Every structure is written in structure tokens, then in C-alpha cells.
Image (cartoon, rainbow, N blue to C red):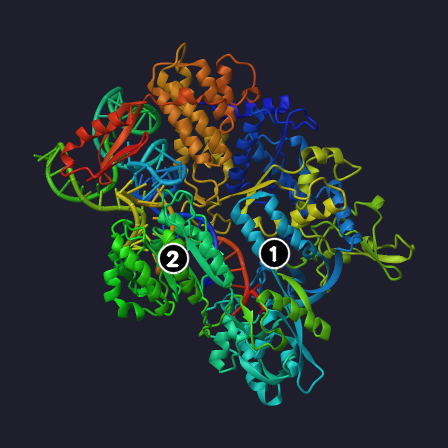
Amino acid sequence: MSYDHKNIDAKWQARWEKEKTFHAEDFSEKPKFYCLVEFPYPSGAGLHMGHPRSYTALDVVARKRRMEGFNVLYPIGWDAFGLPTENYAIKTGQKPQEVTHQNVATFKRQLQSLGLSFDWSREINTTDPAYYKWTQWMFLQFYKAGLAYKKKMPINWCPACKIGLANEEVMGGACERCGAVVEKREKEQWMIAITKYADRLLLDLTSVDYLEKIKKQQEDWIGKSEGAEIKFAIEGTHESVTVFTTRPDTLFGATFLVLAPEHPLVATLTTRDRHGEVFSYIKKAAAITSVDRADETREKTGVFIGAYAIHPATGEQIPIWTADYVMMEYGTGAIMAVPAHDERDFAFATKFDLPITQVIEAPQKKIALLLHGTGGNGRDSWFPWISEKLTALGYKVIAPDMPDPTKPDLQKWLHVLEKYQNEINENSIIIGRSLGCPIAFQFLQKINKKIYQLVMVAPTHADMDWEGYKKKFPEFGVEFVQTIAQAKTDWQKIQNLTDKVTLFFSDDDPRIPLQVKDYYQRDLRADIIVLHGKGHFGTSAGVLKFPEAMDAIVENFSDTKINTPDLAYVADGVVINSGEFDGLTTKEAKMKIISWVEEKGIGKAITHYKLRDWVFSRQRYWGEPIPLVHCPVCGWVPVPESDLPVVLPEVENYQPTDSGESPLAAMTDWVNTTCPKCGAKAKRETDTMPNWAGSSWYFLRYCDPRNNEAFADQKKLAYWMPTDWYNGGMEHTTLHLLYSRFWNKFLYDQGFVPTSEPYQKRTSHGLVLAQDGSKMSKSKGNVVNPDQLVVEYGADVLRVYEMFMGPFGEPVPWNEQGVIGVRRFLEKVERLREKIGEVDDEAVIRCLHQTIKKVTDDIEAMRFNTAVSQLMIFVNTALEKEKISKATFISFLTMLCPFAPHLANELHESLGETTLLETLSWPIANAELAKESELEIAIQVNGKLRASILVACGTEESAIVEQAKEVVAKHLTSEIKKTIYVRGRLVNFVV
RNA sequence: GCCGCGGUGGCGGAACUGGUAUACGCGACGGACUCAAAAUCCGUUGUCUGCAAAGGCUUGAGGGUUCGAGUCCCUCCCGCGGCACCA
């Protein structure tokens, strides 16, 4: 332990505080940068290793931005309302207020000990009445806008503890604490209509810079699907079943209905003779977990309930079943089964021998895919001609642009084709030449589709291994006809190639003699006609030269055939067997059938979202009181804004009630009030808000945290918002992140905030795991406390280790051994200070500039681990030399500062400098100085590394190749076929 | 079951757009310093054959594309995260 981290840490933390180094200035001339981390929930366990990971990462970014001349806002606060604190308070007989106060003090001390560059003057706490006044105010805005409403929803109720439970507290249907079986109780709850914003929450994802996986997860959570609700009358009753379908176009194919086992109509509609079987099935279904029910490989089960529905279009009688593959929570809990066009329905119908009616067939629109060769312009001369012909025949012609046609790369080309894989069907033709041919083969093999008609046009001179392809793709029945003579002898063979592939020769083959060409021209033309369209024709030039022949070929493509699907046909297509709707496309039929059911009054268009409205009530004490009063005369009345906040009354002890209400209900003094409107005796709402409420707008409060007139000043919001960079955990992607985006959008619509989206950029960090790779948790006793580490090694060591331990976005196990390595690194830095001299070694200068470049780039890309590794490389390089200059060392300290600010400042000061490192500018890399003078060139023979040589920078290619040849002479046993030179990297001889 | 991410030495992990795999750190081994130990410094460290020179093998498994694959494509296995019979 050579450096005194305890004193150094304390010294610089005190100085930063004194000089307000990290104070964010409103309306500064500098460009602003608002950098946000998820504020912690101050639990009793104290800080865990995950907090410093995320907080240090953005601290590094924040510190770098300040040195780059930005006015940085990096705030912190406490998300302190919620269940764990309340439960802990009950258990220990303390008040939640006290517990929160203690926890916040611990967290604050711990965070401050890390030297994070938060602007502590903006610290906020969601449980502070001055804060939740505005949370309540915002709830009232939702209420006034009609977005908050009451709805009966079930809650988990523990009859033993007499308290409402969160889902998390219910373990396998029992109370987590006492083990009693949890009851469902219906209770009126406040809801917020987030689903009204579903579309915008989805759409606006395109305007923000979130990690792709975060966007995807939000999209899936919102889960938009468009469809219709359709009512089916029940035969012999006045009842009806409403189903939800995303495929109203398949209405005529509905051959039975399926209700979820929990569907209320199952009980009503089941006929007497079916009771036994149906009810035992329902019982069984209830015992299966939803994950199991979701398993698609599971054998379908279900029972007929004895009743029949009337098909609204055909009037036919169709049976009603119940089956657990239909979920009560989704849609209406009932479906119309269309086995011909839905895989699950198909499996079900097959198993129980129910009728299958096809109502959609493969699209008439036929696809022709034109694949060009290696010509420079990416288009072949015959494209326009053939496109016109095929279009006239009703083909949709696609001629994809291949990446760099002069440099064919099969894999890349295949990539381009992938997006057409769903369009290619039995009516498609693929026309290619030259390189287009092998690509067509590989493409079809890749997408694993049966080929019905593939016309290949290939010049025989192309250096293609046709025989090789023939062997490689036996399933395509490839035949090659490269000469006229062969064409004649193989005639019969060709005629037999129904549904198969023929590669043909082209006229531009220089090897075909002129006289053959004459013959070819005359004969082939006739032959093609005879061939019944099992496609043949010459290429590029050929196409243009023999127009009548081509006409004849193209004619043949006008035949189409429809294959009856032997599986459910789920793709789009054309409607059949549907009366007046026949001939419409899937898309048209969806609209027309929806209008038809709407006219008949038996259904309507529905856009369905997986996203559900937000249950905003909690039957708990430790949350923001909902600022509403219930008056027997006026109904629900908002507390006037001037009376906010509605302060949470302090409870001496909790009296569990059996009413399903929050503990607040027992506090009659508080509950009983007068109606703000009419003055009559009234009662306060006793439910509180979820802890998501306070965290849905905290980023706004940071802009103006002490404002008593508004949640924040408009000008300050306009200056700071949106948040430029927000980092947090993946686990918050669907709830907190979505709720706060919604909340902000609502405030935006009301004119209260300046931006529609709150966060410009969102990234996420990986978990810090225990040493064995499992999750750190209190119950396992494997939680590592940052305090010990800070005491033993210093804040800088913890910070640098957190950044160095692994890729930031991925989970990494904690390893105490690695911490020692970081400590050694910082001690080496300290020793470097002894080497300060007048001059620099050239190698040190070079390494410095390479380091500046890499560290600068890596921080932006959140590659903190490799940034630290580069800093280590610099120190190792510098320590080998006699001296390094003061200027070089200061540049290095500037870069070290975001990671290890205490030591960096201490060393800077030891050089006689009095200013804080934080006031310096971020160094700028000089590309010239970073350049190596010599390069190591690898020499390969047939791709195998054989030697390497050192050459001066700027050596000519020919000189390098010559030198390389000598070095590997003994491996060059035969003639060199090809020499590949990659600039500055390698030479590869192919022999 | 589906989606997303991942699988590289004894360990955490590097590797830019397909171009010398194993940077950096830990650990281990050998040496210096020391009465000794710790700390520090120097050296070695993917693996197999070999005294050596040299050569073979190696990025979860198998196949493919390429002069060249950890990286691209296909099939499969394993781990982590998320999740729906979404009609």
C-alpha cells in the first residue's frame, strides 16, 4: 500500500465540494449535457456493487464531457417510496419515514465516498412532501384529462396478514411471509389509460437513440395488433360469443369456436350431458402454469361443450369447444378457429377431426426475381426488356441491387436476397446469369423452398464449376446444356425436367463457333416452343437478339398453378370460398369484412395492444396519497391544487384491517374531511400511488429541484431537456422506461414540458454477479459491500475495477483478485511520477497519442474495459523508459481523471500544479504522432502463417512482396498462382 | 416453444469493415532482493510432438463460403435474459 488513499480520497472530495466543481449552471453559455442514471431505491442493505458500475460509467462520461467544454448536469436522488421499506418498518416497529431517512444517509455516504461527480445541490427525494406535491399535482392533471379512471381489478389478499400483496410477494399462490393461501379480492382501483398512448409510444421509438434490444423489448411489450371483434350467436339461446381476430379476412374459414377454460360463458353454455367432461377439463387446465400452456410443442387438448354457434356469414352451425391454448387474458378469451390458416387451429382441428375450409390461396401476384451478374452497372441489359414482358403477364418484377457487382461476395449477396424469402413461392421464377446462377441455387437452398420453376441463363464461358454445382445441389435436378450438340442428344432428358432447373448456354460464349450459333438461333427457337415452357433461353444479348423466341418463353410463364396447402397457409393471399369477397387480397378483405360485420352490427374493428392500462392504486401506506376526496353528493372531487400536497399522515402503529383497504383507512382523523366542492362530509381516497409514480418524472425535477411554484421552471426545462444520455438496467425497460416516456408525453401534450420524448439516448449495463456467476442476493449471503473495498483499496480502485472487469453491457462476476490488479496499476501510475524529466521518448509520445485516440473513442462507445487496458499499456510503456515529460504525464492524468479522479488530482498537484485537473481540456490525439514507424507484415502461404517481416512505413508493395518471397522461399514449393497483399497487414501467396 | 444476447487459455476478458487469435489484468511457475516472509522487480506461461530446430492442433460441435473465418452462412448443443398458444 504505497499511496495513502484514505487521505487522498477525503482531501479531493472536500475540495470538489468546496469549489462546487460539479455544479450544473442553469442557462450557461456552454452547450448543455444532461446525463442521467436511475436513482437508487435506498434499501436497508446499502449500496450493492451494481450501483457503482452504472454510476461510475456515466461519471466517466460526465467528467469527460466537462473537459470537452460542456455544461454538465449529472444529478442524483432517492426513489424512496415502496414496499421493502414499509415491510421493514413493520417488522422492526419503526416508522417508514425514519427507515428511509437512515437508508438515505447510508446511501449518500456510500455514494459520496466514491467521488462521483454528482451535483449534490440538486438531490431530490420522492418521499419529500415538496416533491410529491407535484407527483400528486400531475396525477390530478391525468384525472382532469380523463386518463385516470376507476375500475374493478383483483388484488392479492393475504387473509392471515390482512394485507394486500404485490405479485412479487406471492410465491406459488401462497403468501411469501406467512405461507397462507392468497385470495383474489375484487377492488375498485385507480387506473391510468397508458394504452391511449400506445401508438405514439411505439412510433416515437424511431426518433430516439436507444439500444436496439431496448427498442425491441418495448415494441414487444406494447404488442400492437390490428383486427376485429366479431359476435357469434349461440344456437337456441339469446347469448352470443364475441371473438377477437387479427384475421377477419378468414371469417368464412371459421369452422369452430374455442373459448378459454376460464371464459364465463363456458359454464353457461355447456350442455348437461357434457358437464362432467368439461368441468374436469377446466379443473385440469387451472393447474397448468401459463408457461406450460404457452408451449407450442405441447399436444393440443380440449373438449366440446355441446353447444353450437351460428356462423354470421354462412349461417352454418359450428361447434363450440374449450381448450387451454386460448388465453383468457388476451383479446376476448374466445377465438374463431380457422384451421386452414392458423397453425394452432390446424393442429387442433387435425387432432379432433374438425372440418378445415380453405379461404385464402397463394397470391396470384407472381414474383420474378432478376439476378444480375458481375457487370459493373449492377443491371443486365436484358432487365428492362424482360421486366416489361413479365409485368404484362402480371408478374411483380424484383431486381435487387447487389452490393458491389464488380466484387461478388456470395454471402453478402445472399443477405440481400433474404428479404424476399417470404415472397418466393411456387409461382415465382428466378432469372439470373453469370454469378446470379449459383446465388439463385444457394438462395433457394437456404430458404428451403420447393422450386417449381427456375430459369437460369448462364454464359458457358463464365468460370463456373457447373459440374460441381450439379453435384452440390442434387435436390434441384440440375441439368446443364452447354452445347447445341448436347442439347440435341439430351433432348428427352430436358423434356423430362418438369419443375426442375435447366441451365442453358448463351450466345455470347466465345467458344461457340459461328455456325453453331446459326443453328442455335434457328433451332432453339423452335425447341423452346416445343418444350412447353420448361424454361430456356439465351441471355443478355441473346434475349435482345431473338425477341420472338423470348416471347414464346415468356408466354409459358403465364401458366400458374395453385397448390392446396397441406399445412395451414398463414401467409397473405387471395380470398376464395367467401361469397361476395372472393378475389380480394388479404388486405382488402380485412377492410371489407370488417365493414360488413359493422354494417350488420355484429362486430367492429379493434386495434389490440398487449399493453394494458396502468393499475395506479396500492393498498399500502408508504406511497403518495392519491389527492381525491369522495363526496356522497359530488362523487370524486380533486383536492384543490392550493391544498397540495396531501401529506401522508404519520402512523404510530399499523392496524391491519380486513377490508382490503390501505392502513390509511384506519386513520379516521385523516380520512374524514369535507368536500372541496360542496362542503359536505366526505372521505379521502386511502389508496396510495405505486412507486413508479415518483420515478416517472424525476428527471424533470432535477432541472429545477427547489421550485415551490411549479414542478420546474419552463425556461429551465427548455434549457436542460431532453436528457441526453440515460443509463439503466434492462429490467426497467418495460415498466419504468415506458411509464416515464408516457408520463412525459402526457405532460408534453398539456404544454408542461418542452419535448415529446424524455430521453435522447438510452443504454444499459450488465449485472454484477457473485464470484461464482450467480446473482448477488442477501438471502445467499454473497453480497460484496463497497464500503470494505473503499476502506481497503480506495475509491479509485473500486471505480477502475468496475470499469475494467468486463464489457459494460454484459453481466460480469465479481472477482476480488482482479481488484488487486487494479490497485497495482494505480501504484504503478504513482511510480511514474518519479520519472518526470525534460524529454520524452519517441515511443512514449506515440503511445500517448494512440492512448488518447483509443480512450476517447472507447468511452463514447461504453467500452470502458478496453479504455482502462489502454491506460495500462501506456503506463507499462512509459515505465520502461528513463524519463517522461511533465506535459505528457499531465495529458495522461487528464485521461485517468474520469476513472481515478482522486489519485489523478493528487499526482497533478504533486507536480506543482494548483488547479483542479477537472478544469483542464480533454486531450486531442495527433494522428501523425500516433503513427508507427515500422510495420510488421505477416506472410502466409495458402492462408497459413509462415513468417513475418518488419518493414518501414511507406515501403512499396512490390518491395514487400519480394522480401516476403525470400523469407518463405522454402514453403513456395510450386508456382505462385496468386499473391494477395493487404496494406499494412499481410502478404498471402497462393500456390 | 419463440425472441434477444452470449459460448475464445487455469480465470475475467481483447481482436477495427473477413486479414498475424489469446491484447490488458488475475493466477501459476522460475529468478532477483530478503535471515525469512510480504511487497516489488525480471523472465516464462493456449495446447500437443520434440533435447532442439521445427512442426501439428486450437475460439461450444459439425458443415459451408473464401486466398484467408473467433468474425459471414446453415444445422445442432449449452448458458443467461425476456416472453406470448397474441387469435
Q: Is residue A128 shown above or below A319?
A: above
Secondary structure under the numbered disc 1 in the rendered image: helix
Checking the image for residue A454, the label placed there is: none
Q: Closer to us: mark 1 or mark 2?
A: 2
Q: Quadrant of residue A701?
A: top right
Q: Is residue A155 among what the camera can see?
A: no
**Could you tell me which secondary element the residue under label 2 belongs to?**
loop
Residue A354 visible, this angle? yes
Q: Nearer the viewer, residue A426 or A233?
A: A426
Q: Which quadrant of the structure image shows residue A590?
A: bottom right
Task: Assess disc 1: are there few (<14), some (14-19) or many (≥20) residues with their C-alpha within 10 Å of its C-alpha.
Answer: many
Q: Chain of mark 2?
A: A
Give the residue at the far top of this rendering: A838
Q: Is residue A80 above or below residue A856?
A: below
Decide if residue A392 is on the left or right side of residue A316.
left
Which residue is depicted at the point 37% across and 64% down?
A535
Which residue is identified by label 2?
A546
Q: Position of residue A40 (x, y in %)?
A: 60, 42
Q: Which residue is mark 1?
A: A222
Looking at the rendered structure, the kind of residue marked 1 is: Ile
Residue A596 horizontal/vertical position (percent):
68, 72
Amino acid type indicated by mark 2 = Phe
| Residue sitting nearer the eye, B22 or A791 | B22
The C terminus of chain A: image quadrant? top left
Whether residue A274 is situated above or below residue A664 in the rendered picture: below
Q: Earlier in the sequence, mark 1 or mark 2?
A: 1
